[in-house]
Amino acid sequence: MGLQIPAINEQDSAGKIEVTEAVFGQSFNETLVHQLVTRYLAGARAGTKAQKTRSDVSGGGTKPWRQKGTGRARSGTMRSPIWRTGGVTFAARPRSYDQKLNKKMFRVGIRSILSELLRQDRLVVSNDVLPKTSKTKELAEKLKNVDAKRILIVVDSVDANLALASRNIPYVEVVESINLSPVLLVSADKVIATPAALKQIEERLA
C-alpha cells in the first residue's frame, strides 16, 4: 500500500499524489543522515590553502655568518622558520576534504530524509506553484500562504521563469530533482515538489 503526499492547498490542481512506501516510508536513520550531510559540507570546502616551507622560500643558500665569534646566536640559513622571512614550520598544503560514501548509503540516506519530511508534514506537492511569468511578485504571491521561512522548490527541470522569479526572494531555493542534496533537504522548513519531480525521485531512489 502506498503513501500519499498532500497538496500545498486544496485548490492546487496536483491534488494528493500516491508514492511508494519503499522510498517515502523509511525509518529515520540519524547516524546515516549526519554522515551524509557532513560528507556534502566537507566536499564543499575548497582545500586550496597553501603556505611555504623552508624549502620553498627564496634565499638561504649560504650560512648568514660564521659559527663562532660574532656574539650572535648560531644560524645555518635565513630560511629557518624562526627568521622573519623564513618558511612556515608546519605549512598548509592544498588538500581534498572529500569523504567516501557509496551510492547505496546515499540512496538510503535521502530516502530517510524524505520519509521524515513527509511524517513532519514538511513535504507537499504542487502543480500551480510554478510561475507563468518571470515576475518575482507572481511567485511571492503563490508562496504567501506557505507557513515556512525556508522553502525548497523541487522541479524536474528549472525553466527561465522560475529561475528569474525566485532569485530575489529570500530563503527560497530552487533545485532540479536530479541535483537534490541532503543539505538542502534538512535545512528547508517546507519542501514543495512538482508531480514530475516526485516521479523522478522515486525512479532514482527505488
Image: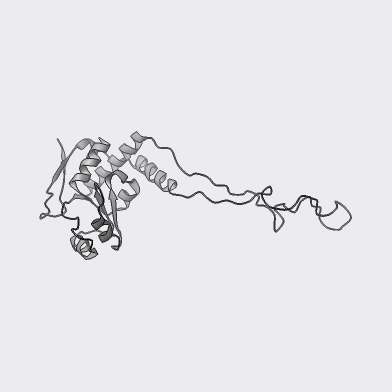
The answer to whether 28 is drawn above or below residue 71 in the figure is above
Residue shown at 48% from the left, 44% from the top: 97
The answer to whether 100 is drawn above or below residue 133 in the figure is above
How many labels were placed on the picture?
A: 0
Residue shown at 87% from the left, 52% from the top: 68
Q: Position of residue 56 (x, y in %)?
A: 66, 49
Q: Position of residue 14 (x, y in %)?
A: 13, 49
Q: Position of residue 177 (x, y in %)?
A: 27, 45
Nearest the viewer among 183 and 127 is 127
Describe the colour scheme in one phrase. Answer: one colour
Which quarter of the picture shows residue 73? bottom right
Q: Quadrant of the N terminus?
A: top left
Residue shown at 70% from the left, 53% from the top: 58
Q: Quadrant of the C terminus?
A: top left
Residue furthest right as drawn? 69
Nearest the viewer among 20 and 166 is 166
Name the side, left or right, on which 200 lies relative to 109.
left
Residue furthest bottom as drawn? 137
Residue furthest front as drawn? 160
Q: Position of residue 17 (x, y in %)?
A: 15, 44
